[in-house]
Amino acid sequence: MATPERTTLAERMALASARAAEAHHANLGGVVVAARPQLVHPAPPRAAVPIPRAHRWRLRATPGEQIVLMPGQMYVGREAESAHTLLGSCVAVTLWHPQQLIGGMCHFLLPTRQRKPGDELDGRFGDEALDAMVAEVRRLGTEPSEYVAHLYGGADTLPEGAGVKFNIGERNIEQGWTLIDKHGFQLQGVDVGEDVPRTVKLTLATGDVDMRRGGGRAAPPALPGTPGWRN
C-alpha cells in the first residue's frame, strides 16, 4: 500500500501506530500475525543475468537454511527456509513474492551517507541496502511492484533524560518508508517507533511475518538460534 508523496513523518508515524494497534487486536501469544496474500502455484523463473560476485553483507543460503541477519546485512532468494533479525533503532524491510515464493530482508543502521564516486554499496545504509535488494529482485527476473513489504524497527533506544536526541530511529523509519514507496513495493505490515526492541522472522514458503516486541527500554530479546529464542 503506497502512501502519498506529501505525507509527513508525523502522519506516517500516526498511521503506523494505528496499523500496529489493529495488529495487536489479533495478537496470538505475542505474535503479530500479518495478513497473507493469496497463494498461487509458483511460476517458473524468468531468465536472469549472471550473478555478480557476492559481498559479505549480501547473504546467500543453502536450501532450507535459517538465515540470521546481523546489522548491515541483506538476503534475497528462494533457498532459505526463513530469515530472522533483531532490531533496536535499526530498521528491517521484508519482501515476499506470492507467486515465485521469493523472500528478502535487509537490516540497516542509518538512513544514508555521503557516498563517494566509486564506493561500493554498503548495507549499513538504508538507500544502499534497498538499491541492492532491488537489483537482486530484478536479477531473479521479477519487479519490485510484485512484492509485498513489511517495515519494522526504528525504536528510540536512548535512555530517559538524555540531553541529546539524534532521532536515528525516526530517520530510519522515514527512509525505509520513503524507499518502499519509491521502489513500488506493496506495503502491507508496519510496526515502528516507540522504545521497544523487536525480533522479526520471515518464512519464505508462506510469506508469514512473525514480529515480537520486547519490553520498553528492557534488555532486547535473544537472537534466533541462541538461548531464550522461542519459535
Image: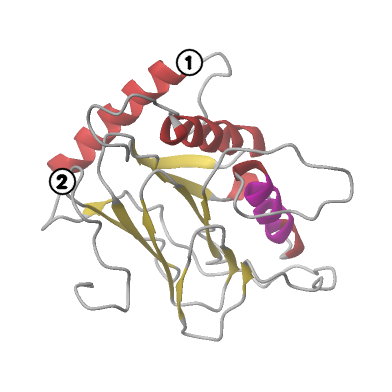
- Magenta region, main secondary structure: helix
At 57% across and 42% down in the image, what residue appears? 185
- Element type at marker 1? loop
The amino acid sitting under disc 2 is: Ala
Q: Which residues are magenta?
A: 128-137
Horizontal side of 77 relative to 217 (left or right) equals right
Residue wearing tag 1: 8
* Residue neighbourhood size for the residue with mark 2, other residues' Cα within 10 Å, grouped as few (<14), some (14–19), many (≥20): few
At 21% across and 44% down in the image, what residue appears? 217
Residue wearing tag 2: 26
Horizontal side of 161 relative to 96 (left or right) equals left
**Relative image position of residue 8 (x, y in whole percent):** 48, 15
Q: Earlier in the sequence, mark 2 or mark 1?
A: 1
**Relative image position of residue 62 (x, y in whole percent):** 56, 86
Q: Is residue 181 magenta?
A: no
Please name the colour scheme applied to the rendered image.
secondary structure
Horizontal side of 140 relative to 163 (left or right) equals right
